[in-house]
Image: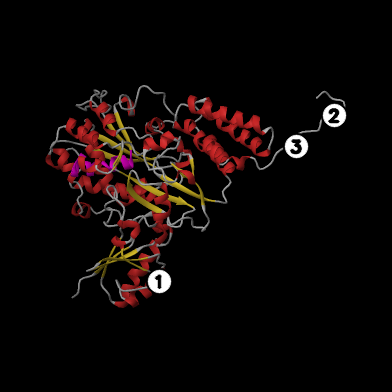
């Protein structure tokens, strides 16, 4: 009896929204109808979203891909022969130009494994980093992360090693559980991915959850924390399922719990769901929410590393930061820092969204240009019109004009021009975009999502919308522009957190690079009355 043919259909949210579940059902039904033995594996997406659902068939030559596949196409795939030539074939997936030139460290397993199979994870190099960490002193783990140059991938780009060193050196607070025998510290993962056009965190949680679990466990060993929480965006139900399944499997097999792989070291992990507030992506508001309170920004100091969750020292990093740790402990700090430029080391999973032909995930070492990302990978706009502006870093990121497309992706290089790399989200706009409307949206977004704790953010964003409306209407335009710039300065300098402090970035960049969009009309000045003084 011949071996069953392995067929892969993604279980990623993007693929499911485009019909992957229906395609999987059709494949199972067609195989039964034809008497063909198959092994259907629900892998994750590789990040080629314009080809989803992307069906892959294992062959001696490699995994052959077909996409985008509709349920109605399944019969023809079987008729041609699984793995054979077909109009939807893209050839060997690993050889696809979109994938072949990427540097995938964090997403090395994306689309290759069954996300919730621990055996699959181990077979593809999983838990090697944790195995090394179990044999190391906490300070040595922190030193490796510091030496790698890893910086927070959530937007602030703060060196992860420095944060970890602070928590390691801070005595834990009194135990919160009766009978506990050690001071408590925590590892908190910020998985409240709320920026428009971003999906890398979701892809890790859905597509390689053991990677995040491994990274958080290593962090726990490094700083002496025995408990961790994943604060997950409520709009990610598939991620919640995958994470909980992976946590259960890791616990059963001793990779989590009171005695990790017989080491005597312990770490427990659980998922907590957010409630949809953008402000809870800010680390201190997230901690408030995690404690069961309203998500309001805390004053700093004290820093969360010293007094964080429940008043205890806390490492709080985002998904990509923690998911970058296992490869550092597996292959070494030198291997990781080999990628990148300047002080921006390693790779960044860039997310291409908006008006782009080939939307999806591209993991590249720092130093790649925006032009390369937009055209080599993105293929230009979906509309076929010229790209006019690109917003990098989510809804608080600056709008970048074509004149800056050759700037290398680097934290410091971007900061010099008042741009930000942020979480790596890139939203593309063609030449039909109205940049004044985009600027107004930034203020509107800030007003809607503000926690209301500080005046510059709460009031400034509302006043910002009003001033932009008057500016566009031509109502004393010179005066309104000066007022808008002054208001932005106040928000930048006076806001309690990054929401109010960065909302001016898109406004000022639109105003500086696309001034004509704010001058679509002007109010004629009344003619002086006869005899009036000149």
- The reply to whether residue 459 is in sight is no
Q: Earlier in the sequence, mark 3 or mark 1?
A: 1
Q: Quadrant of residue 315?
A: top left
The residue that mark 3 highlights is: 524
Q: Say whether residue 356 is left or right of residue 172.
A: right
The residue that mark 2 highlights is: 529
Q: Residue furthest right?
A: 531
**Secondary structure found at label 2:** loop
Which corner quadrant holds the N terminus? bottom left
- The reply to whether residue 520 is in sight is yes
The residue that mark 1 highlights is: 73
Q: Nearer the viewer, mark 1 or mark 2?
A: 2
- Please give the name of the residue rendered at 26% of the width and 46% of the height, measured from the top-left corner: 211
**Secondary structure found at label 1:** helix
Rendered position, 376 above or below 222: below
Looking at the rendering, the stretch of residues picked out in magenta corresponds to 318-333
**Secondary structure found at label 3:** loop
Q: Say whether residue 410 is left or right of residue 123.
A: right
Give the CA distance from mark 3 to mark 1. Answer: 61 Å
Give the CA distance from mark 3 to mark 2. Answer: 15 Å
**How dense is the environment of label 1, judged by Cα within 10 Å: few (below 14), some, or many (20 and up)?**
some
């Amino acid at each position: 009896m011949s071996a069953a043919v392995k067929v892969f259909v993604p279980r990623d949210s993007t693929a499911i929204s485009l019909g992957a579940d229906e395609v999987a059902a059709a494949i199972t039904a067609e195989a039964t109808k034809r008497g063909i033995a198959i092994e259907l594996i629900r892998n994750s997406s590789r990040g080629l979203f314009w080809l989803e659902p992307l069906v892959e068939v294992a062959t001696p030559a490699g995994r052959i891909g077909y996409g985008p596949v509709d349920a109605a196409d399944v019969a023809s795939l079987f008729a041609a022969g699984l793995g054979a030539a077909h109009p939807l074939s893209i050839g060997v997936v690993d050889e696809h130009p979109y994938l072949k030139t990427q540097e995938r460290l964090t997403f090395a397993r994306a689309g290759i494994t069954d996300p919730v199979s621990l055996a699959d994870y181990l077979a593809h190099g999983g838990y090697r980093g944790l195995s090394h960490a179990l044999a190391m002193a906490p300070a040595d783990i922190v030193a490796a992360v510091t030496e790698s140059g890893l910086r927070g991938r959530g937007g602030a780009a703060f060196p992860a090693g420095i944060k970890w060193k602070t928590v390691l050196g801070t005595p834990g607070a009194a135990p919160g559980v009766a009978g506990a025998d050690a001071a408590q510290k925590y590892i908190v993962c910020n998985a409240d991915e709320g920026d428009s056009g971003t999906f890398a965190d979701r892809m890790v949680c859905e597509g390689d959850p053991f990677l995040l679990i491994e990274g958080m466990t290593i962090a726990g060993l490094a700083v002496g924390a025995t408990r961790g929480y994943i604060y997950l965006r409520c709009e990610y139900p598939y991620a919640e399922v995958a994470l909980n399944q992976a946590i259960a499997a890791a616990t059963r097999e001793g990779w989590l719990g009171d005695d990790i792989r017989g080491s005597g070291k312990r770490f427990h992990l659980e998922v907590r769901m957010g409630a949809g507030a953008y402000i809870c992506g800010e680390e201190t508001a997230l901690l408030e929410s995690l404690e069961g309170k309203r998500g309001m920004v805390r004053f700093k100091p004290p820093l969360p590393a010293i007094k964080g969750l429940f008043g205890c020292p806390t490492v709080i990093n985002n998904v990509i930061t923690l998911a970058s740790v296992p490869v550092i402990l597996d292959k070494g700090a030198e291997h990781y820092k080999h990628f990148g430029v300047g002080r921006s080391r390693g790779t960044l999973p860039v997310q291409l969204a908006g008006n782009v032909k080939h939307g999806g995930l591209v993991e590249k070492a720092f130093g790649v240009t925006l032009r390369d990302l937009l055209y080599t990978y993105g293929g230009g706009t979906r509309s076929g019109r010229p790209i006019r502006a690109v917003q990098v870093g989510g809804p608080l990121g600056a709008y970048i004009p074509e004149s800056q497309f050759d700037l290398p992706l680097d934290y410091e290089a971007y900061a010099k021009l008042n741009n930000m790399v942020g979480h790596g989200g890139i939203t593309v706009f063609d030449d039909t975009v109205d940049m004044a409307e985009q600027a107004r949206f930034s203020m509107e977004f800030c007003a809607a999502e503000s926690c209301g704790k500080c005046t510059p953010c709460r009031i400034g964003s509302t006043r910002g919308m009003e001033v932009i409306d008057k500016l566009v209407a031509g109502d004393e335009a010179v005066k309104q522009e000066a007022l808008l710039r002054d208001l932005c300065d106040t928000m930048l300098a006076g806001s309690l957190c990054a929401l109010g402090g960065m909302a001016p970035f898109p406004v000022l960049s639109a105003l500086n690079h696309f001034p004509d969009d704010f001058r679509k009309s002007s109010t004629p000045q009344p003619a002086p009355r006869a005899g009036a003084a000149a």
